[in-house]
Image (spheres, helix red, strand yellow):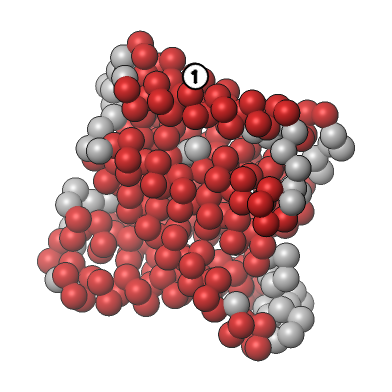
Amino acid sequence: MTPVFALATSLMWGLADFGGGLLTRRMPALTVVLVSQLLAVLALGGIVIGTGGWSEAGPELWYAVAAGVVGPAAMLAFYRALALGPMGVVSPLGALGGVAVPVGVGLVLGERPGLLQFAGIAVAVAGVVLASGPGLGGAPVQRQTLVLTLVAAFGFGSVMALISEASHNLTGLFLALFVQRLCNVVVGGGALYVSTRRGAPALPEDGWSGIRSALPALAFVGLADVAANGTYSIAAHHGPVTVAAVLASLYPVVTALAARGVLRERLRTVQAAGAGLALVGTVLLATG
């Protein structure tokens, strides 16, 4: 089941990143993060109450708190990078940290994938790197965009490692995700307050009407991101973290394809080759 849940994670993260990147082109990134996560908190709160998730409270929830603190900073950096640079470049580079941190944790904890799976990891990671091909032959990516992307990459990898330790059953997972998102809202709200005190706008140019009209898209971004965290946690608990992390980090391919279909961003040959290698690596991991 690990490949199925991990690939579902890639699909939902890829679509959430695409939606978040589009939204930050017409409203402040902090507002996108805060509103989308607030909507996710409301949905998760209802699920926790309905399932009696409070009974699963324990020390492991501190992992969810840590993920909730790191997550908004990573998400903000990533959305800003998506708004500043081409999605086909930013998204693949941002995925590298999502691979490196969880895989490193898994290896430290003693996981030893087989030879075929090691080959799959290498091929899949190479595919993610090549998927950032426009930066190799076109105009150089701005330094600010690169720094924001690397910050986001490390943050995403840390969140993946933390959330996989925050629960050990489905009911506890709902509670952990609720706590994580509640911390996201608190941290994101504080950051938005500081930003507005410094004169930055909190609302899009069309004000509250712009927020209201974007609520369906904001809800999709928040809920897809939550669902992706949940399926990744399940994948990590049902198989090697090294395999789950690599398959879950293929979401840049989804983002790049969505950008190609909706925004008509052109995929260069090296990007198409990267997507193909990512698919080959997925097959090797799934069959290994």
Q: Residue furthest right?
A: 139
> Is 120 displayed left or right of 174 in the figure?
right
Count of all numbered marks drawn on residues in the image:
1
Establish if 187 lies above or below 158.
below
Residue 224 found in image quarter:
bottom left
Quarter of the picture containing the C terminus is top left
Residue 6 found in image quarter:
top left
Q: Amino acid at mark 1?
A: Ala
Residue 38 on image: x %, y %:
45, 74
* Mark 1 crowdedness (10 Å alpha carbons): few <14, some 14-19, many ≥20: some
Q: Residue at x 56, y 66 (%)?
A: 33
Q: Residue furthest top?
A: 115
For residue 40, say whether it is visible: yes
Establish if 118 lies above or below 162.
above
Is 53 in front, or is 147?
53
Residue 232 on image: x %, y %:
35, 46
> Is 269 displayed left or right of 12 in the figure?
right
